[in-house]
Amino acid sequence: MKLQLTSLFAALLLAGCASVGSVDPSQLPQAPNAYKAQSANGAAALTTSWWQPFADPVLDDLVGRAMAANTSVQAATARLTQARAALGSAQAARLPQVGVSAGAGRSSTPGQLVPQPANQFSAGLNLAYELDLGGRLLHERNAAALDVRAREQLLADARLLVQANVARGYLALRALDTERDIVRDTVAAYGETLSLTEKRARAGDVADLDLARVRAELAANEAEALALDRRRVELETALAVLVGEAPSNFSLKPTTWTTALPVVPAGLPSELLQRRPDLAAARSQLEAAQARVGKARAAWWPSLSLTAQGGGVSSELSNLLKSGASTWGVGLLGALPLFDGGRREAGVNAAQAQVEGSAIAFREQFLLALKDVEDQLGALSLLQAQGEASARAVSAAGQALKLSDTRYRNGLVSQLELLDARRSELANKRSALQVRSAQYQATVGLIRALGGGWSEAPVRVAGV
């Protein structure tokens, strides 16, 4: 019987000794050598203050306020604090536990003919230490440390997301202000055209239909201006929430849009993608899941705890700390489950399934990151060509409007032709502005996709 138990004990130890390897990088998705839209001959470096190349003091101020008061960042900070507390608890479990105890009671001594109640006082110092034979406590501590690292990276990702959203909202607001100026200039121009048309109508030079057309165009552009005003209010309140302020106390005055547009380097190294904080967090979560497999396998090991205590017991409180009342004891407590109905095996299977799930989540996050980078690089490449075409269209439409206005005032063309020329110029100006705005949005999107941008000098983009 003794030999059988020894064999069983050895088998359980061997089951617990199955090693838990670290994550094999070759089994994880790898970054491409180059992105579709660019070669890989660049050497751009990440920068933590990626928004500064936009050279806009208002944007700098908004990002700073958001980092101080944004609720999403504060929530991520709180989750990091919780993870650090869990790590502290896991580290404490590997250290000796020391405590003091004290007690007082009154009882009778059994066996006496006439029981005589007596007082009993006790005080002592207790020590307990678990010998981590299978590494269960170590794996638990390592998993908690990886959880902290993941939370640190998720906090960095939350900050980056908020910074990008602030930049996008602010740049959209500045683009909208410029668009509002275009529409208001158009409203003013239509107002002048209406005055001229009314004078000519009173003189009998134009028909009532022409007058009605100008009034309709003027009203339509006034309505469009009001729609842009409404959209501005929405963007402004969204920015207020991002910087952690009440919308009623937040405002940004319209101003000339002079924000610089950072130039994307000719070649971006694919390694930049690997620095994304969300990818780093997913990697840490995968490694933490792997560590928990080790913790689950360590359940096959026996538990062994060393205990010690010392103190005193006395019927008189005054004699409690005297040498005659002292007691002490040392013990070693071991336990080894022989049959648990498959609980430990199920725990290992669950931990391994968590590793597989974390690996799949990492791969999905990696593929989405690749998509983000490719989308923004492709968008910037096409927007550059689109912007050049839009600039030519604006120039041609402006020239056509000048010619049509001169010919209309001289009575050489109909008023309908003038209105068409003005509508064409407005449409082309707004289209060019939208392309310019999309360039800023795609640049911020690329910086977000790469995890923080690069170190490059900004250039100024001429206003539309």
Image: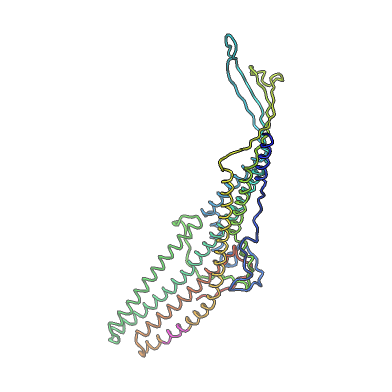
Is-magenta flag for residue 72? no
Toward the top, the furthest residue is 113
Toward the bottom, the furthest residue is 412
Count up the numbered dots.
0
Toward the right, the furthest residue is 323
Whether residue 418 is situated above or below residue 241 in the rendered picture: below
Quarter occupied by residue 458 = bottom right
User: Which residues, given as a range, are shown in magenta?
Assistant: 396-403
| Closest to the observer, 28 or 341 | 341
Is-magenta flag for residue 397? yes
Residue 230 in percent (x, y) is at 40, 65
Q: Quadrant of the N terminus?
A: top right
| Closest to the observer, 317 or 403 | 317
Whether residue 379 is situated above or below residue 26 in the rendered picture: below
Residue 150 in percent (x, y) is at 60, 53
Quarter occupied by residue 99 = top right
